[in-house]
Image: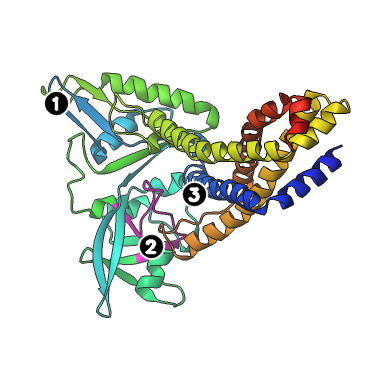
C-alpha cells in the first residue's frame, strides 16, 4: 500500500512542476534555517569544552544588591568568591576567573588584537583544557605573581607564526611580557566564561583583586565531588547567601546564585527576570512564526492539488474507498513531499554550515550536524508534513462523489 502511495505521490509531483518547486523550496529553506539555528544552539549549550565535568559543576556569575530606589548587578569580586565560596564544605574545588578583556600587541610592526583573562590555580583543575604544549601554572606561581601565561592555538599562530614548540618563549600583553607555559585548544567566543587568547595568574592583574567590594570582574565555578552532590552544593550556596550581609545601608537585599550551565549562560542579571523563560519563549516564537508561513503556503498549494484531483477522488469514492483511506493516503503523500524537502534542506544545511565555518563568522565556533540536529530536523519534517496535510486531507474527504466527478 505504501509503495503505491509513493508512486502516486511522485506522479503528482511531476504533474505540476512549478507547484512542486514552490513546495520543496519552502520546506527546504525553512528546514535549512532551523537546522543552522539548532546547530548553533546545540554547540553553544551542548558543547562542554573546556568544562567537561559539567554535571558536577555550578556557575556563579553575578551578585545583585537591591535597595528601595536603587539596584546594582554584575560580576563578582575575587574577594567575594574566594572568601564566601571558600567557606563552603561541599565544593572540592572553586575555579575563579575574570571575564576576557581586550588589548593590542605588536609583532614586526603588525597589530594583533588580544583577549586576556586572569584565573586562580584551581581553575585549571576544574576546567579540562586540551593542552597541545606545556602545562598550566600552579599555585606557587600564582602566589608569587610570576609573569607566566597560557595561550591559545590561534594566539600562538598569530604571534609566533608557524613554528615549533613555543613553551619558554615570551609574549607581550598589555605592555607586559609573560613567559609561555602552555598552549591550549581554542575556545569559541560564545563560551564567554572560558574564552581567551591569553590566560594569566590573577595576582599579576593591575586591578585591585584584594578589594573587599562585592562587585568586580570575576566569575566562579564550584565543583562537587560527584553529580549526586550538586543539589547539596546548590542548597549550601543559597543558605550561605542568606547570611551574607549587604554591602552598605543603601541596599536591603542581596542575591547571588549557583546555577547550572544553561541557567547561568542566559542569566539576565536581574533577579526579577528569568533568562531561561525569555530565551525559551523567544526561540519558540521564532520557530512558530518561521514554520507558520510556509505551512500555510503548503496548505494552499495542497488544496489546489486536491481540486485538480477531484475526479480521481470521485472515482475512488464511487468504487468504495472510505474517507479515512483517502485522508490517510493524502497525509502519507504529503509526508513524502516534506521528507524530500527535508533531504534537500539537510544538504543545504551542510553547505551553509561549511560556508559559515570557512569564513569564521563567529570566532573559533565550528558548527556541525550531529545526531541531535538530525533528530530535530526529522521531527520538524514530520510535524511540518502532518500539519500542512491534515486540513487539505479533511477537505478532500468531504468532497461529494457527484460533485467531484462533475468537476472535471
Q: Residue furthest right?
A: 319
Tell me: 368 left or right of 400. left
Q: Quadrant of the C terminus?
A: top right
Gap between marks 1 and 3 measured at Cα = 38 Å
Q: Is residue 72 on the magenta stretch?
A: no
Image vertical order of residue 294 relative to residue 263, above or below: below
- Calculate the distance from the C-alpha at mark 2 to the C-alpha at mark 1: 40 Å
Question: Seen in the image, is 227 located left or right of residue 221?
Answer: right
> Is the residue marked by circle 3 packed among few (<14), some (14-19), or many (20+) residues within 10 Å?
some
On the image, the x and y values in percent for residue 361 come to: 41, 59
Looking at the image, can residue 328 be seen? no
Residue 134 is labelled as: none
Give x and y (percent) for residue 226.
Answer: 53, 32
225 in relation to 180, above or below: above
Residue identifier under label 1: 70
How many C-alpha atoms fall within 10 Å of the one at disc 1: few (<14), some, or many (≥20)?
few
Q: Which residues are magenta?
A: 180-201
Residue that label 3 marks: 49
Q: Residue 148, image x and y in percent?
A: 32, 61
Q: Residue under circle 2?
A: 151
* Lower position in the chain sequence, tag 2 or tag 3: 3
Q: Which quadrant of the figure contains the N terminus?
A: top right
Q: Alpha-carbon neighbours of circle 2 within 10 Å: few (<14), some, or many (≥20)?
A: many
Is there a contact, CB below 8 Å, between mark 2 and mark 1?
no
Amino acid at each position: 500500500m505504501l509503495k503505491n502511495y509513493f508512486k502516486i505521490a511522485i506522479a503528482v509531483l511531476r504533474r505540476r512542476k512549478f507547484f512542486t518547486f514552490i513546495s520543496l523550496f519552502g520546506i527546504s529553506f525553512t528546514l535549512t534555517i532551523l537546522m543552522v539555528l539548532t546547530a548553533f544552539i546545540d554547540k553553544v549549550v551542548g558543547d562542554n569544552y573546556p568544562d567537561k565535568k559539567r554535571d558536577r559543576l555550578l556557575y556563579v556569575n553575578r551578585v545583585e544588591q537591591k535597595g528601595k530606589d536603587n539596584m546594582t548587578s554584575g560580576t563578582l569580586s575575587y574577594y567575594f568568591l574566594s572568601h564566601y565560596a571558600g567557606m563552603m564544605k561541599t565544593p572540592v574545588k572553586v575555579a575563579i576567573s575574570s571575564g576576557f578583556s581586550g588589548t593590542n600587541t605588536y609583532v614586526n610592526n603588525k597589530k594583533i588584537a588580544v583577549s586576556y583573562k586572569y584565573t586562580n590555580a584551581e581553575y585549571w583543575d576544574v576546567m579540562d583544557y586540551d593542552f597541545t604544549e606545556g602545562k598550566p601554572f600552579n599555585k606557587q606561581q600564582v602566589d608569587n605573581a610570576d609573569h607566566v601565561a597560557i595561550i591559545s592555538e590561534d594566539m600562538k599562530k598569530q604571534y609566533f607564526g608557524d613554528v615549533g614548540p613555543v613553551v619558554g618563549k615570551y609574549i607581550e600583553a598589555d605592555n607586559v611580557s609573560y613567559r609561555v607555559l602552555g598552549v591550549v585548544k581554542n575556545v569559541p567566543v560564545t563560551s564567554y566564561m572560558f574564552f581567551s587568547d591569553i590566560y594569566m595568574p590573577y595576582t599579576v592583574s593591575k586591578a585591585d583583586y584584594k578589594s573587599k567590594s562585592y562587585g568586580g570582574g570575576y566569575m566562579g565555578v564550584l565543583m562537587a565531588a560527584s553529580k549526586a552532590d550538586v543539589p547539596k552544593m546548590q542548597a549550601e550556596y543559597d543558605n550561605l547567601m542568606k547570611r551574607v550581609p549587604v554591602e552598605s545601608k543603601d541596599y536591603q537585599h542581596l542575591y547571588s546564585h549557583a546555577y547550572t550551565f544553561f541557567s547561568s549562560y542566559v542569566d539576565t542579571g536581574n533577579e526579577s527576570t528569568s533568562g531561561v523563560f525569555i530565551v525559551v519563549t523567544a526561540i519558540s516564537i521564532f520557530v512558530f512564526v518561521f514554520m507558520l508561513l510556509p505551512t500555510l503556503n503548503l496548505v494552499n498549494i495542497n488544496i489546489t492539488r486536491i481540486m485538480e484531483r477531484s475526479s480521481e477522488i470521485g472515482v475512488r469514492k464511487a468504487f468504495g474507498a472510505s474517507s479515512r483511506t483517502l485522508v490517510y493516503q493524502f497525509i502519507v503523500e504529503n509526508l513524502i513531499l516534506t521528507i524530500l524537502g527535508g533531504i534537500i534542506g539537510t544538504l543545504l544545511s551542510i553547505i551553509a554550515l561549511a560556508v559559515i565555518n570557512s569564513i569564521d563568522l563567529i570566532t573559533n565556533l565550528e558548527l556541525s550536524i550531529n545526531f541531535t540536529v538530525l533528530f530535530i530536523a526529522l521531527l520538524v519534517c514530520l510535524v511540518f508534513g502532518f500539519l500542512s496535510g491534515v486540513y487539505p486531507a479533511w477537505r478532500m474527504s468531504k468532497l461529494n462523489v457527484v460533485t467531484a466527478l462533475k468537476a472535471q
